[in-house]
Amino acid sequence: MDPASTIGHQEFDRQRDPQHHRTLGSDAGDDRDSRNASPEQGLNRRTFVARGLSFVGLAAVQGLAPAWAAGKPRIPDDPTRVPGSPPSAYGQRSTFEDASRLVSPSHSLTPLQALHGIITPSALHFERHHNGVPLIDPARHRLVIHGLVERPTLFTLDELMRFPSVSRTAFIECSGNSGGEWREPKGKTAQETHGLTSTSEWTGVSLATLLREAGAKPEAAWMLAEGSDAAAMTRSIPLASVLDEALVCYAQNGEALRPEQGYPLRLLLPGWEGNTCIKWLRRLKLGTTPFMTREETSRYTDLMPDGTARRFTFVMEAKSVITSPSGGQQITPGFVEIRGLAWSGRGRVTRVEVSTDGGRTWKLAGLQEPILPKCHTRFRFPWRWDGQETILQSRCIDEMGYRQPAREALITVRGVNSYYHYNAIQSWKLLPSGEVRNVQV
Amino acid sequence: MSRSKAPWAFMALAIVVGLVMVGNEVPAQDAPGPYGLGFPATEEEIRAWDIDVSPNGEGLPPGRGTVKQGAAVYAAKCAACHGATGTEGPKDRLVGGQDTLATDQPVKTIGSFWPYATTLYDYIYRTMPYTAPQSLTPEEVYSIVAWLLFQNGIVVEDAVMDATTLPAVRMPNRDGFVSDPRPDVERRERGHSLIPGIPSRGLALWLEHR
């Protein structure tokens, strides 16, 4: 195997992001030097595992880390011969790592193709907000529960943390995830096609506990949840459907919520549209009917070919995507571990099947424990690429027996104008050059 | 006498407390809820945040606005983003699009898509203008709503919008929404149970089943 094939990573990073392209392009000479110096090269030469996908090349990183490219920390030739850095108060990732969210004015996308396991690092959890991330002092933040309750109640954050706490590892997926794929293979990378889903361990207090504390009246059937952001984001939630699992969360992956994820308080409705998991939660109002806010009438409703629109389509149906090899990546012939994520808003993923021949045959992928309900599940499939053009696909089946649909089946029923809830099988085409492209079959 | 009774009293209390704890309830202290946490929200505190408006008009404040007033407020505070007539953008198109929803290029606007006129009040007050949300007076919101409804051909030019007239406005796409029929594409595999829909039962039923 030619060690120079690691260049592939640098190349697709350039394709993926024009800004990176400019940065990298400006110091290509340095890239080449650092690549030659990579201590991992010898290792890779001795193994048959194609290296292109398994690590981010030093070369690509150097161009993205101008701090040390400018000469601040000096890289020792032999790290066993110089003392390392002292402990630090809040850790940072290695300066060699550069996986980043892809940012637009209203949202940012998780770099699924660069991640491992099922937990999304908090700093890389996708964002979707409707008028920016508010700056909230937790000492001044309050949650009010009112409407059809015996005791309209205000809670401080300290008080909420005194209630029995519950942790739950769950995905949150924006219902607009993959929305660009309804009409055409729009996204170039897995980040662009599927990056509006992320998984965290969430900790908080059960919504049911809080509603009992406020004395919810039996006739209450719907709850308006409202955020403390500049959109005062609101959704109406049918209570009986969520009380078993809904959490009011103050923590994510062991620490306080990130500001972009609702600091200091957010709702978590496992398996439901991300927008229902109201961030910066300040108000819960109980009523008998839905409140019909803009976010459940004009938005987050799914237009069908006959002109009607489905409303309150809360559940995120089963979906999967191969994260490597995936669009924009570059691979070489030989052993390739096909890796990806599968999830279902209705429960556990029970099976993931992979096709390496454009859907003619399907084989079972291995599922990595833990396989949790309403949570990303990591799947893997060992494969050897012969260098011929082909199409890679994955599809998942959840514990309710629902099977992720083919694109044709999905658009036959729903047309191409619904925007939300696109969960069709994703196809990645491998070209003989080793390039991976988003296609629709 | 009292010395011999004390241990019994203590034990009885301990048993009662124990039973309450086993029942996952903690005796109330400062507040009447099971855990005694939180504090009563006053009407004034609630009013400051209670800004939602329901389709039946609940939540609409006093005040009124006309189409003519609305044209001026819209031009001053909305047109920069939504265009002079509500069709030009660059942000969301607000006017027109009727009879396009079932076509290949649907245009979803207030007139063609929104099912409830009250949502206009709620959303405009809640979020607009984008750079200064919750800054409009009730008169300004009512008048912008009146103008937008007029532009969409839903109310007449001399219409006055207030807490009584707005909920009575029937939007053209009022009946254009259906409930969630999923799973609608792939059906269950053999041997698996049917997928339950989202129940519409109330809180009472849920509480009974706990």
Image: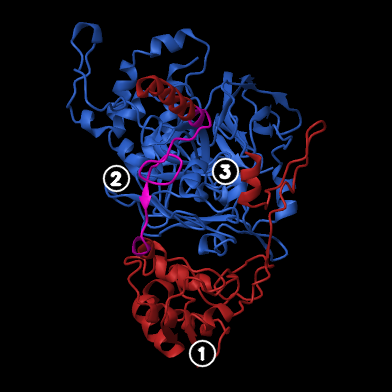
Chain colours: A blue, B red
Amino acid type of the residue tagged 2 in the rendering: Pro
Which label number is shown at residue A138? 2
Amino acid type of the residue tagged 3 in the rendering: Leu
Residue, x 42% and y 9% (percent of image)? A43
Which residue position holds label 1? B159
Magenta region: B19-45
Element assignment for label 1? loop
Main secondary structure type of the part rendered in magenta: loop
In space, the residues marked 2 and 1 are separated at their CA atoms by 45 Å
Q: Nearer the viewer, mark 1 or mark 3?
A: 3
Q: In this view, does A327 lie to the left or right of B84?
A: right
Q: Which residue is most to the bottom?
A: B158
Kindly tell me whether residue A433 is visible in this rendering: no
In space, the residues marked 1 and 3 are separated at their CA atoms by 44 Å
Above or below: residue A153 compared with residue A404: below
Q: Nearer the viewer, mark 2 or mark 1?
A: 2
Amino acid type of the residue tagged 1 in the rendering: Ala
Residue A199 position within the rendered picture, expressed as x and y whole percent measured from the top left: 49, 34
Badge 3 local density, few (<14 within 10 Å), some, or many (20+)?
Answer: some
Circle 1 chain: B
